[in-house]
Image (spheres, grey):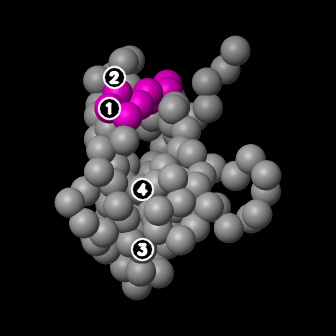
Amino acid sequence: MNKPEINNEQSIYRQSNNIVNVHGCMRYKCFHCGKSFSVFLEIGVEDDGRNGRPRQPCPMFIACECGEMMQDISGYLPLPSIREVLPNMKYFAYDNSKKEYACGIISIYKKG
């Protein structure tokens, strides 16, 4: 089976320049290349509906830039308070498609 070729962040992450508020994060690690990082959670993603949106899960696995998969290694990690995500931070965006099985979409924040 051929692995997907991933050359840059734009091929993995949806980009947003709207203000995004986050309430927590999850840590992901690639057990192939060793890379790890936090992915923040937009309001409604993994928050059990506490902040006014129906809850959406986020994936347990995401694509790594090396072509393998990264795995959630932390579970939900709450922030002390809701805050705005900073430029170039990775986050799971709330999926507004209204699909029954919608889940957070891996994104990167680019303040416009």
Q: Does the stretch in magenta take in 70?
A: yes
Q: Which mark is residue 41?
A: 4
**Outermost residue, bottom direction?**
112
Q: On the image, numbered disc 2 is attached to which residue? A: 33
Circle 4 sits in a helix, a strand or a loop, which is it?
Answer: strand
Mark 3 / mark 2, whichever is N-terminal: 3
Asked whether the beta carbons under mark 3 and mark 2 sit within 8 Å of each other, the answer is: no
55 and 12: which is toward the camera = 55
Specify the quadrant of the image occupied by residue 40: bottom left
Asked whether the beta carbons under mark 4 and mark 1 sit within 8 Å of each other, the answer is: no
Identity of the residue drawn at 44% across and 37% down: 65
Q: Magenta segment, which residues?
A: 68-75
Q: On the image, numbered disc 1 is attached to which residue? A: 74
Q: Which mark is residue 4?
A: none
Mark 1 / mark 3, whichever is N-terminal: 3
CA gap, disc 3 to disc 2?
30 Å
100 and 34: which is toward the camera = 100
Residue 88 image offset from top left, x and y in percent? 32, 64
Residue 21 image offset from top left, x and y in percent? 38, 72
Q: Which mark is residue 20?
A: 3
CA gap, disc 4 to disc 2?
24 Å
Determine crowd level at label 2: few under 14, some 14-19, many 20+ residues with C-alpha closer than 10 A: some
CA gap, disc 4 to disc 3?
9 Å
Q: Does the stretch in magenta take in 95?
A: no
